[in-house]
């Protein structure tokens, strides 16, 4: 334990600790907990004043709706006005897991959770600690990523503690969130269903189950004033240090900034070698998109703490496997073309 952070064994979650966290949620408090994507900042979704605490702790605009986490299908169905067969197919295939479904909400879901809109985002996470907590509290839990608005999402309990600290009543530490990137957000209130945010479940995986899906590309159809999913706006998921993407084998910008005396960090692939690399902080991530994704935010969090001024990232390939990583890079830089 350190401050309000308590570690839980994922294989055998300590039931006393889970009960304590569940009681905090039942009493209207905030609990940060691990999911397989990133850590979430949870409150009882049915308690308006508890949910308000999330918005305050994060500094999140009230029009940005929250994902509601549930432990099973029955709990999910209780919150939707209708449950299309599409939802059954998707849930059967991907829940528990990294897919968030947007459905029409019913009267049980307070407007504060949905940013005033008539849809609700639902997900059953695939993390034993999250599931133990959801089962124990027997409540739907509204939980955005457990970071201040516009900061990086946390993939470790320490990231949550550093960013939100005492604003959270209790942080359940369950080791690194192994997915490392947020869930795929899929709107199934429209036809064809539309991916609002690419994530760990790819369009190809979805299409195998439900046929064609539409991918909302950056900025497409979205005006900041009438956002359906404000988390889609550009300046999200960004580190505080400037981040620039560079093409493979193009080291000209590295050389240019190095010559100006700027302290550079470079997240790149194993085959990329800069001639003066002893003068820069190099982080090598694997070519495998899933493993890369699992380490990407953690690498950025690490570099935020180090004595470097400027971050470069070698662009991953334009392949579906890299869609979510490229999406987050685009938001972090504004510079990536699609
Ligand atoms: O992996 C994840 O999704 C994590 C873990 C904790 O579950 N959660 C997460 O939540 O990333 P958050 O709030 O950081 O991002 C949720 C995204 C936002 O872009 C939000 O605008 C969108 O989902 N969203 C939530 N409810 C929505 C709704 N009813 N309609 C459209 N978009 C919605
Ligand atoms: Mg977030």
Image (spheres, rainbow, N blue to C red):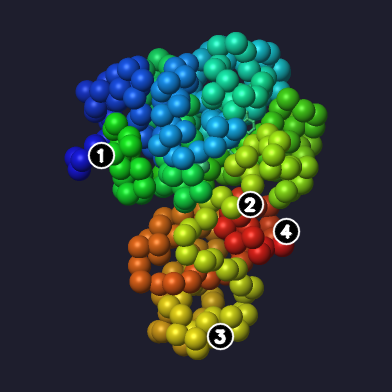
Disc 1: CA contacts within 10 A as few (<14), some (14-19) or many (>=20): many
Of residue 305 and residue 157, the one placed in the foreground of this image is: 305
Task: Tell me if residue 97 comes above or below residue 298 in the rendering.
Answer: above
Residue 102 pos. (x, y %): 65, 27
Of the residues tagged 1 and 2, which is closer to the observer?
2
Distance in Å between CA atoms under marks 4 and 3:
25 Å
| Mark 1 / mark 4, whichever is N-terminal | 1
Please tell me in which quarter of the rendered image ligand 1 is found.
top right
Distance in Å between CA atoms under marks 2 and 3:
27 Å
Distance in Å between CA atoms under marks 4 and 2:
13 Å
Where disc 1 sits, the SS reads strand
**Cβ–Cβ under 8 Å for marks 4 and 3:** no
User: Residue 159 bears which disc, if any?
Assistant: none
183 on left or right of 193: left
Residue 277 seen anywhere in this rendered image of the structure: no
Q: Quadrant of the N terminus?
A: top left
**Residue at image mark 1:** 5
User: Residue 256 bears which disc, if any?
Assistant: 3
**Residue at image mark 2:** 234
Q: Quadrant of the C terminus?
A: bottom right
Disc 3: CA contacts within 10 A as few (<14), some (14-19) or many (>=20): few
Residue 58 pos. (x, y %): 44, 39
| Mark 4 / mark 2, whichever is N-terminal | 2
Disc 4: CA contacts within 10 A as few (<14), some (14-19) or many (>=20): few
Identify the residue at horizontal 65%, vertical 24% (top origin): 117
Identify the residue at horizontal 54%, vertical 25% (top origin): 113
**Cβ–Cβ under 8 Å for marks 1 and 4:** no
| Mark 1 / mark 2, whichever is N-terminal | 1
Which corner quadrant of the image does residue 279 belong to? bottom left
| Mark 4 / mark 3, whichever is N-terminal | 3
**Residue at image mark 4:** 338
């Amino acid at each position: 334990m350190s401050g309000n952070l308590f570690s839980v064994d994922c294989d055998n979650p300590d039931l006393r600790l889970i009960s304590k966290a569940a009681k905090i949620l039942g009493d209207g408090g905030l609990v940060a907990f691990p999911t397989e994507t990133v850590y979430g900042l949870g409150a009882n979704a049915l308690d308006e004043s508890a949910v308000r605490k999330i918005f305050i702790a994060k500094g999140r605009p009230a029009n940005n709706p929250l994902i509601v986490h549930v432990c099973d299908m029955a709990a999910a169905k209780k919150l939707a006005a209708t449950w299309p067969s599409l939802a059954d197919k998707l849930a059967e295939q991907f829940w528990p897991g990294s897919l968030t479904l947007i459905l029409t909400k019913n009267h049980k879901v307070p407007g504060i959770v949905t940013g005033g809109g008539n849809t609700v985002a639902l997900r059953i996470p695939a993390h034993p600690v999250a599931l133990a907590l959801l089962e124990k509290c027997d409540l739907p839990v509204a939980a955005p990523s457990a970071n201040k608005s516009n900061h990086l999402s946390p993939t470790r309990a320490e990231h949550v503690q550093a960013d939100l600290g005492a604003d959270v009543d209790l942080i359940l530490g369950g080791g690194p969130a192994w997915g490392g990137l947020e869930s795929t957000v899929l709107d199934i209130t429209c036809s064809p269903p539309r991916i609002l945010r690419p994530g760990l479940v790819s369009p190809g995986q979805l299409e195998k189950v439900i046929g064609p899906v539409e991918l909302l590309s950056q900025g497409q159809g979205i005006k900041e004033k009438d956002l359906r999913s404000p988390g889609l706006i550009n300046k999200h998921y960004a580190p505080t240090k400037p981040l620039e993407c560079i093409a493979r084998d193009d080291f000209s910008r590295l050389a240019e900034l190095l010559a100006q005396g700027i302290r550079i960090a470079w997240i790149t692939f194993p085959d990329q070698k800069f001639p003066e690399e002893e003068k820069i902080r190099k982080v090598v991530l694997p070519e495998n998109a899933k493993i890369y994704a699992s380490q990407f935010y953690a690498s950025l969090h690490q570099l935020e703490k180090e004595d470097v001024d400027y971050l470069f990232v070698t662009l991953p390939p334009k392949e579906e496997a890299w869609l979510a990583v490229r999406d987050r890079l685009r938001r972090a830089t504004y510079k990536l073309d699609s």
